[in-house]
């Protein structure tokens, strides 16, 4: 089993979710994160001074899945989450030692 | 007239001016509460500028257009000149102790100007909520300036300035039509030219876009109600004890009935206790009673408010069905209830002609709608009226103002240093 | 009486009406600030409905009960009939230039009604904060409607309506007892029947449940203070220069002293600068001075306010000890300081009888408490007064209104499409 | 003078008192909006205490210092005694129907006191915004109490109390200098002794520290504008119809022009639509017109407001350059525009001496600055005026009040049980 | 060493925390997350339209622990975080390559 | 490849970021978290009752990096994020199975 963490743009969420749904992924966990990266943050003006916010708001999707689905999910995110501009984000895949569904106590693939 | 009566009359009009002024805070908070967080600075900016622009244009142009003087009595258009001033003959009359030399001793020319100027600014503010979250700031400010400088005073002149409607017994006490429906019609025209917010209407259906702060919205409505005592009460144009107190009673009852019936009808429709509908219902009741607050009985005031309140949920849903995207419900509150209130005078006040109420109401609305549509359209094809899709997604606060309404996470070191 | 004096008297009462009206915004903001985020829409909804319900029931029933007329002088109960109107004889007297035909020329019957109606609605609002965060909306609205329609006017009649207390020299200028303690006693009764919020008191101890917005709470208190100038100042029942200005001074000094002494005592107790106590201390000072604002000296006003302010932190802690869970401190502010203020008149005003102050105060409170307890209990065993535990955890905004007060994360695409 | 005229005059002053009172809510909201979230409770606490302290010290000391009576005419300093009261001879004159026995029949002694007390409290509030986010609460409260008890009334006496400036034709209608510049000068002195917020100025440059809530800031400005009608309008010191209405017009036009020109200049500087500048521009226009609202023409009012508005963005940037860290712009708004407004009277009002305007303005400012600097310095070397660096980072809400302004996540079980 | 991530209901937090404390786990990191899963989100009404929020607010607990304690912790969460209704959440366990306590620089088990 | 998760104090963020930048790490993802640990939370007063918040606000930095840089990064965080008081936080290192840059589809080290 794997856990996929994808950092994406806010504006791509709708497309990514639809793309995931099409390949059968409907369950995931979403986090609001701040991305520090190549893309410059917004520039702001306050009382006559211009300044940069050094981060950009991003969303992180955590998806638990079985090994064989990983590639399909990664592809789906890459194609739906891409704008081509700097700052599209990253997908990271981790090995999972164990998964348990709290409701039933089911483990491993059955829990996903 | 005695100096004393003149002084107390004038004092009431000045206090009413303060109350109408605070309606601008009411509108600001209501509109801020009903838009998304990312467009909050923008709506506050528009509201702060509108009151300034409204006062200035009314000083230079509007007042002269709206009260062109007796030479234009019964007419459609006139102009008394730029600026506001104390006519020499009035000053002399006052010096001679003739305090009814102006406006039957209800107030001074200065009071007249400033009270009217506050009304004018109110009318322009009505539009800002309806076009929120996607209109270009510059285009909106130009629209608002021209609208309040020209369109509002012209229709205002038809009735309050002694124009053709005044001569025909049309009755619009404090402006259900002359202020609210005029503003509401402009809002409708502006929304039609501008289009809906991105994502609002799609093949998937109607996407509700909830406002970001119900406390701000509720505060706005309470402040508007508060200010309405000046709006309607001041329209008595003197401190006449029975007259003003009667208007307070009808105004209060209509607002209360509006709240209750908006609640009942919206509960019937969606089986929930929808605060936004109750808030709009209060405003609907207030707009509704504005035309007849001086001439209808308390029971009629209850009926007018109740029907206005009941209209609100139906109207809001209806406008959504026909894809008129109005984030704050300005068209339902000001246009629809404004029409209702004006017609209601023809129904509930024995000596008012329903026909002339309808003629007056619709001719004024038609003028405001056509003027606004044409003006908005002209702006659209010239400087453009809509922000880019990307800017709309980001929010106007960042794209137009490079600023956020709320700095949530000061503790996280999210800010760099000034780069300029 | 001259037309001029009549007009200025009446004008002041109308301005005071506006000021009392804005107290409803004050209460709304105070209560919204002191509840948790998840119950904010609910408290705003209740406050918006209460003012509407208060005005309507007072129009139909309350006024007639509270001012039943001379036939019931010295009595306990009477009814003058439904609705509010301009008596024909008053209208005739006015037409004949007899401006003191009603209320000694202080105001018109219309003004009388609307000023009193605002007071009535205020009283009902006091309860809403105390029962916040767990009462069923429907049950509360029924309670509030019956309470304001029947209980408040009956005790009001005992004094202001010329009933038995008025005859015995009881003095409650603007309602420390008749409005505040009546509302506070109802709040106490309601809380006793309803019980504490889940988790508030457990074997682990008392769990503080902080309100979600101190700016809203502070705003509410400033607005209440502002409105209090109308509440107390208007209770002079004319624009009498010395009378009203004196009341302004005593009211201001008591509020200021309340702030300072609530600060001192709460600092002594918990070694910190507790904003919520200072805010409640201001209100305590205002409630305290309300009974005697016209008859006590400025120095006495300072003493009354100071003691009221000092009472607040002690009372708040005491109620928590006896497990009366009152999220906004309504019982401390309105009931305890209301009693104190009423008794203080007997102490500081030479010609008032302490005994009659005590008799008046406690008989009125007893009536309000018993009535409210019985009514709440009846609602409990019939329709139920408390939301389910699950709904309480979720918050009343979602469970009763299916709405959130703040849409924080518009940028995250958290909303689906309308399903109906 | 007739009873009627006396009553209406006095009524206006009382209504104006209410309006000036609500400016304290305006200041509270403005300052709360312009500080960071973590210092919000602190600023609210300071503002709630200042109005209380201001009223109390003015009652005990300030009024006697500011209006020492005819014996001190033309002087620099005097004292009429503690407390406020109704002089026996005035009471007798009133009883005898001589209503102009006090203040030319403009108001009663009680009104006089409370109206003036509200002004005094306003002046102290100006300081609180400038020193926000790093001053120790205790030190600030002591500073504010001494300042409002002593410094403000002394310079006030020079002009309004019949002192040496009054004798020389200095004109400061409602206090561009006597209230605003006095407060602004104290703010400047306090900031100089106190130093900038940690991190604001470093070798990396100037770090902007945005305020946490633009809606609160905007609300504050609208409320201040609203209150200014009482501040300036009430300074007519009677309900004189032409006088008060004229002041309403000049005040409104200056505020509107201030908004527009602050917008234009700030747009020219930073190519964006900076709401915080427009808000300060409105206040700048209001402060500017305050000295001459009664004597300059409407066109001059526009010019005064426009220039004040234009000054704001320049002044804000300038103060940042010289490392005067003023989170809310109090020095720009109140000091700089206060000076401008006072001098402008010498320019636009034909019969006022520019030289005496300058002398008056600068001598008053010098006194306030030196007094405040010395007092702040004395506090610094004794009890200390600045919170520790760690406390500043944590925020004053937690370090001084152990409280948070907003409880965001009630749903997460973040709170334990009371430990005491 | 292992890291345990548990997605739980807000309303179960108190019970989960107590259960963890009982088996000696007092240190963890908490995150506010949004869960997209089988359970439908709340339904909302706004201005006459009914709509669903497609997510549910959840809490994520991150717990670092030694290998032998993992089962006890998982069991504790499953038993205290269960309501039996759809939406109770998931527990995921990951291998950890290294842990360092910033205060002391201690590594591995000593750092936990 | 590795993913480093560091829980740090808010007040150390500036120093940590600067230390990371100096060793060439400019890209990371930041999360607001609540730490339950040895350090007591702030104590609060509300309406006469004193109580403790049982958590402390913390920041979590997620850094993706190649294996050889891990030690340098950990050292940089330890030295810049340390105050010596209880509550300085933890650094955890995980193995990463795969990384993809959404913008380009690049994988592994190239994606970081
Ligand atoms: N080394 C990294 N570790 C953790 N997060 C990263 C790293 N690099 C990038 N990210 C995350 O991915 C987001 C987008 O990355 P960025 O480098 O700006 O654009 P791109 O991937 O298009 O080159 C960043 O905002 C950040 O949240
Ligand atoms: N495949 C998944 N990947 C990541 N998170 C998941 C996944 N499935 C469920 N979750 C998380 O667990 C929560 C509860 O899961 P859900 O499937 O709704 O209920 P249950 O586990 O009781 O069947 C979800 O809201 C989501 O946050
Ligand atoms: N076992 C753990 N699992 C997850 N997070 C932990 C664990 N222990 C500590 N933390 C996180 O690290 C933070 C600091 O740890 P703490 O134990 O308070 O101080 P120190 O590491 O200095 O002893 C905690 O607030 C928490 O967020």
Image: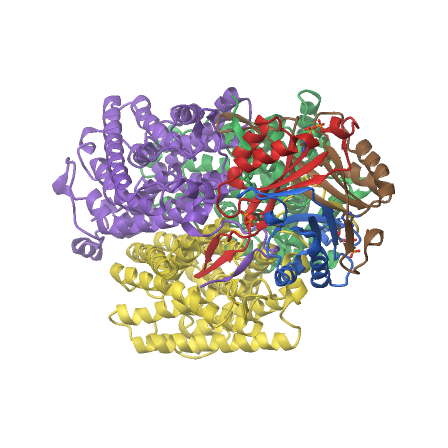
Chain colours: A brown, B green, C yellow, D purple, E blue, F red
Please count the marks in the image: 0
Vertical arrangement, residue D221 with respect to residue B233, above or below: above
Q: Position of residue D26 (x, y in %)?
A: 43, 43
Nearer to the camera, B90 or B202: B202
Which image quarter: residue D31? top left
Q: Quadrant of ligand 1?
A: top right
Q: Is residue E9 left or right of residue C306?
A: right
Which image quarter: residue F45? bottom left
Q: Position of residue C28 (x, y in %)?
A: 52, 55
Nearer to the camera, B183 or C310: C310
Vertical arrangement, residue B117 with respect to residue C266, above or below: above
Q: Residue at x 61, y 26 (%)?
A: F24
Mark yes or no: residue C71 visible.
no
Q: Is residue D338 left or right of residue B223?
A: left
Q: Residue furthest left?
A: D71
Q: Residue at x 82, y 52 (%)?
A: A108
- Name the quarter where the N terminus of chain C is drawn: bottom left
Which image quarter: residue B381? top right
Nearer to the camera, D74 or B298: D74
Q: Position of residue E37 (x, y in %)?
A: 78, 51
Q: Is residue D318 left or right of residue E69?
A: left
Q: Position of residue D23 (x, y in %)?
A: 40, 43
Q: Is residue D336 left or right of residue C138?
A: left
């Amino acid at each position: 089993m794997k856990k996929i963490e994808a950092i994406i743009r806010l504006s791509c969420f709708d497309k990514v979710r639809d793309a995931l749904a099409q390949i059968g992924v409907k369950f995931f966990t979403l986090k609001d994160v701040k991305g520090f990266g190549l893309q410059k943050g917004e520039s702001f003006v306050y009382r006559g001074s211009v300044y940069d916010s050094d981060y950009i708001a991003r969303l992180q999707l955590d998806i638990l899945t079985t090994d064989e689905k990983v590639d399909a999910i990664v592809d789906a995110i890459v194609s739906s989450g891409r704008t081509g501009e700097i700052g599209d984000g990253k997908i990271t895949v981790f090995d999972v030692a164990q998964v348990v569904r709290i409701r039933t106590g089911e483990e491993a693939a059955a829990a996903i | 007239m005695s100096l004393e009566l003149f002084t107390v009359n004038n004092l009431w009009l000045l206090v009413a001016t303060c109350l109408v002024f605070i309606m601008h805070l009411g509108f600001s908070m209501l509109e801020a509460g009903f838009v998304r967080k990312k467009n909050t600075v923008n709506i506050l900016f528009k509201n702060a500028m509108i009151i300034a622009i409204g006062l200035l244009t009314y000083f230079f142009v509007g007042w002269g257009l709206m009260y062109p003087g007796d030479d234009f009595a019964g007419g459609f258009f006139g102009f008394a000149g730029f600026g506001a001033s104390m006519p020499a003959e009035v000053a002399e009359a006052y010096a001679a102790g003739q305090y009814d030399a102006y406006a039957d001793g209800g107030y001074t020319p200065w009071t007249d100007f400033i009270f009217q100027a506050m009304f004018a600014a109110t009318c322009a503010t009505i539009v800002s909520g309806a076009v929120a979250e996607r209109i270009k700031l510059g285009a909106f400010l130009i629209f608002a300036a021209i609208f309040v400088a020209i369109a509002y005073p012209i229709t205002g002149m038809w009735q309050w300035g002694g124009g053709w409607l005044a001569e025909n017994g049309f009755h619009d006490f404090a402006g259900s039509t002359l202020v609210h429906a005029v503003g509401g019609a402009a809002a409708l025209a502006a929304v039609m030219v501008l289009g809906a917010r991105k994502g609002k209407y799609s093949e998937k259906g109607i996407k509700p876009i909830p406002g970001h702060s119900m406390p701000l919205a509720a505060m706005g409505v309470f402040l508007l109600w508060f200010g309405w005592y000046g709006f309607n009460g001041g329209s008595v144009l003197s401190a006449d004890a029975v007259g003003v107190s009667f208007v307070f009673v009808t105004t209060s009852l209509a607002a209360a009935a509006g709240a209750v019936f908006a609640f009942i009808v919206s509960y019937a429709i969606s089986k929930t206790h929808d605060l936004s509908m109750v808030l709009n219902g209060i405003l609907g009741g207030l707009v509704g009673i504005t035309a007849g607050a001086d001439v209808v009985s308390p029971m009629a005031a209850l009926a007018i408010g109740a029907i206005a309140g009941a209209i609100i949920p139906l109207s809001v849903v209806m406008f959504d069905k026909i894809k008129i995207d109005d984030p704050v419900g300005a068209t339902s509150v000001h246009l629809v209830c404004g029409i209702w209130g004006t017609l209601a005078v023809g129904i509930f006040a024995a000596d008012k002609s329903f026909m002339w109420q309808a003629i007056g109401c619709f001719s004024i609305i038609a003028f405001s709608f056509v003027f606004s549509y044409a003006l908005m359209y002209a702006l659209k094809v010239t400087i453009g009226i809509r922000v880019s899709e990307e800017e709309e997604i980001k929010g106007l606060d960042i794209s137009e103002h490079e600023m956020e309404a709320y700095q949530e996470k000061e503790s996280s070191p999210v800010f760099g240093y000034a780069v300029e």
